[in-house]
Amino acid sequence: MTRALWFLLGAAGMAAGTWFGGWWAVPLVGAALGVVRRRDPAVALVAGLAAVVAWGALLAAVTDRAIGPVLPTVGPVLRLDPARLVAVTLGFAAILAMSAAGLARAVSDRVGDR
Amino acid sequence: MAAAVRVPTMPRLARAAVSALALGGALYVGAAGVGPLPPLGPLLDPAHGLVAPARSAELPVADSATLAGLGADVTIRYDDRGVPHVFAHTMTDAARATGWVQARDRLFQMELTQRSAAGTLTELVGARALEADRSARRRGLARAAESRWRALPDSSPVRALLTAYAEGVNAWIAQAGPEAIPVEYHLLGKAPRSFLPQDTYYMLTVMAQTLAYRDDELRREAVEALVGAEATAALFPVDAPIQEPIIPVAGRVAPRITPFALPAPSALTPGRVAQAARLLETRRQLGDGGPSLLAGEAALGSNNWAVGPSRSASGHALLSGDPHLQLTLPSIWYELHVVTDSLDFYGVTLPLSPLPSIGFNRDVAWTATNTGADVVDFYRETVDDSVAPSAYRLDGMMRPVERTVTEYRGPRGERLATDTLYRTHRGPLLRTEMGWVSMRWTALEPSDELSGFYGAVRARSVPEWYAAMRPFRVPAQNFLVADRGGHIAIRSLGRYPIRPGDGRGDRVFDGSRSASDWTGDWPESRGPQVMDPAQAYLASANQQPMDPEVEPGYLGWDWPTPWRALRINELLRADAAMTPAKMQAAHIDPKSALTGPIVNAVRAAMAATPNPPAAARDGLAVLGDDWDGRFTVDSRGAVLYDAFLATLIDRTWDELLPPGDSAGPRVATPNTMILARLLGSATSPWWDDRRTPDRVETRDMILVESLERAWLTVTAAHGDLPRDWRWGSIRQANIRHLLQLPGFGRESLAVQSGPGTLSPNDGRGVHGASWRFVVELGDSVSAWGTYPGGQSGNPFSSRYADRVPLWQHGELAPLLVPRSAAAMPAARVRATLTLTPESR
């Protein structure tokens, strides 16, 4: 399978996992990507991008694409303007996915070497 | 894509270590939070976190659910104002459905209210609420709520009603997904608690605390220490010196002005200064007493008025309600219409109650203002141990103190603090700077307000309504009622204790004698009441209910100013063809009965002053010549008047500043009724400002200097040119979220309000009209209303604050009152919810 397809699969998995499970689905799917694609040196990046796309899509869906009015309401509560709130949300997902994929890749590589 | 990306390589172990560290850190911050941050994972999760409630912001056009316990289907139609019209066969089914719909719209507010009475806010928001919780527990609010619930007989229909209501709330919670749980829970990282039927009584104790708790006698004693007993009695009198009572006096068309003399303040001694300080500290220790009347002008200023058929254009009775409370989002009220096989009522409920406090049915309409009666007393107790008393003295014998250990828990169940609560036979026993003080308060004693409201919604006439409300005791309210038969009436319903001796309760009593205790309650027949007066109109604005010259008796002291009452009566007296539109306009009437006497006094002072300062002359040109005395949003004169009045008050009541602290705040501030009366005395020693020891001021000097200072203050703040001043830019309403969350409130709203107007505003703008409505009781009922907020508690909802613009401009929306679900105009139906019994 191509990297692009894995990227899409990862994004779909993270979105579905978050929707039906919770935020912890992001590192879980990220780790799965890291194991399955351990030969891909860019798997962490792919996982991170997948997380950004997944949570970005969820944000748009949840707010009925009305991110504009919703985020300015929520942002001040966290002392963040809307752009920063989006950045923090997507950045958090990206870190979870990238680090999980990177760690899983490293561990599975080592196990595979043995 | 695969060929295009080249990733720099890193040693495998280092890569693994970096990834592990990043993942560990992210998981920790995600699951546990860091510092003041809540756990970020559930918070930022777009499907279940902070923004998830955006998914449930709008009501589905058609929705259905099963609700265990229902006897039959219940149809709920939401109109275009977000008001649920509940169509059920029985009242119990309607209450169960009401629990569901209120939880759907206001769940967090309901929990916050219950916890504020229970003293368990710390479990939700942490240690920052510890003092509020301590205050609630020490006052015994939860105990009162529980004992009222226990006192309800098993056969009481109210018991069944509240049980069904709580089950409706819990049923909604049980089926609610994370997207439906209010955003505040996501922020706090908490889940909703399960509700109990008695929670409604907790909510009622919160209202009682807002409306009927006063500890001003402690502040009054501090004033007495500073200026002497005689002066204090004149500054904070038992009877208002301007009598415009709620109960009209036959033939009287102007207020009765009573003789007024303000004795000179007595000389200060170090002992009295120390005593004043002790008393003020005691008051602080007893917790926040809410808005004090001794603060000059009451922040809460409710109004109501009604006219009989002979004074309305339509020939029907008209009733207007304008209760003022704290402005919050979500709003304090929830609008509701219920139709059952035998009932049809509409009104505003306090979330946590299935019954409206204010409203109407097809025959009767009712509304209320706060009576403000004195229903709290304090007693100095003699105890056996000044640290942890186990007994107190009563009539020469030591009686045991009831002691209860209570714990305050944090959000994670951790113990934050422990307290011992003490009680005497009178009520809570509190440790203060002046020793141990016990408290007796009607709100902590048996009463059954809900049975009153349960009967009231069934009433077909004014007499039936009052008969049904007989159980209502706390907080005492001036209930104004009109019916379709053209009758209007007002009665100050409540429990009024009878004290020993002179009957007054404006002091702290000696707790060591049972002779200090209340000896009974006013009989119902003695309470302020009138029906169908000859003048054919009635009004109340928190003023002293009865003229003591006509009906003596102690109900309270330091009554709010009569300016609002005078203005309402002026409007009603002048118009024998009142209409709903005129009543609506009166809600934000921009005139104040106080303005005339104040402006006339300063005009006379200027005329009597040779060579007044230029600033004062400029001020008089704006205040006395250019200003029409109206507090409109665009008014310039109002800006100067407000600054002038504040300066005048500051210059006049310097005797009430804490000794040695000329910056204040004052120990107490007499209201403007006293100030207006003092203006009649040109050389009263009270005009002398003790802060200027080298001169002795007179009234005219203070008036002119206050105007000069006000001019300088206003020009410095708003510019030299009066045309640049705008009242609406300085006097605004601030509707804050219940948790004061930024972004969730609506602030800096220019509103037409001013000192002494029907819509008073103390400057902070956090109190105001909480619900304005007008009802016409003709062949069919017509009603108009609005409140500052919206039906939904979800900040993402279009129904969260949609009524604010209408409210801000003093407009009302027509209320839809269909007799059946089928009769509701399709064009005005926004959503339908069908609740069906579980067994089907």
Image (cartoon, coloured by chain):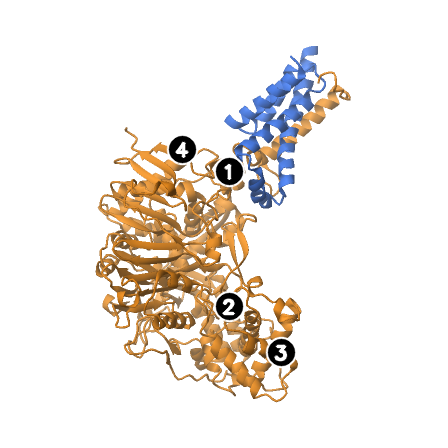
Amino acid, disc 1: Ala
**Residue bearing the label numbered 4:** B175
Establish whether labels 1 and 2 are both on one chain: yes
Q: Which residue is mark 2?
A: B631
Figure colour of chain B: orange
Q: Earlier in the sequence, mark 4 or mark 3?
A: 4
Alpha carbons under labels 4 and 1: distance apart: 17 Å
- Say whether disc 4 or disc 2 marks the residue closer to the N-terminus: 4
Q: Is residue B67 visible?
A: no
Question: Which quarter of the rendered picture does the N terminus of chain B lie within?
Answer: top right
The reply to whether discs 3 and 1 touch (Cβ–Cβ < 8 Å) is no
Residue B293 placement, left or right of B481: right
Query: Reading the chain from its start, which is encountered first: label 4 or label 1?
Result: 1
CB under 8 Å between discs 1 and 2: no
Disc 4 versus disc 3: nearer the observer: 3
- Residue on which the image places disc 3: B618
Tell me where residue B405 appears, x and y as whole percent: 42, 50
**Secondary-structure class at tag 2:** loop
Three-letter amino acid code at the position of disc 4: Gln
Mark 4 vs mark 1, foreground winner is 1
The answer, for residue B641, to whether it is visible in the render is yes
Task: Between label 1 and label 2, give the one nearer the viewer.
Answer: 2
Q: Pinpoint residue B344: horizontal percent, then vertical percent.
A: 27, 48
Q: Do marks 3 and 1 share a subunit? A: yes
Q: Which quadrant: the C terminus of chain B?
A: top left
Q: Nearer the viewer, residue B776 or B214?
A: B776
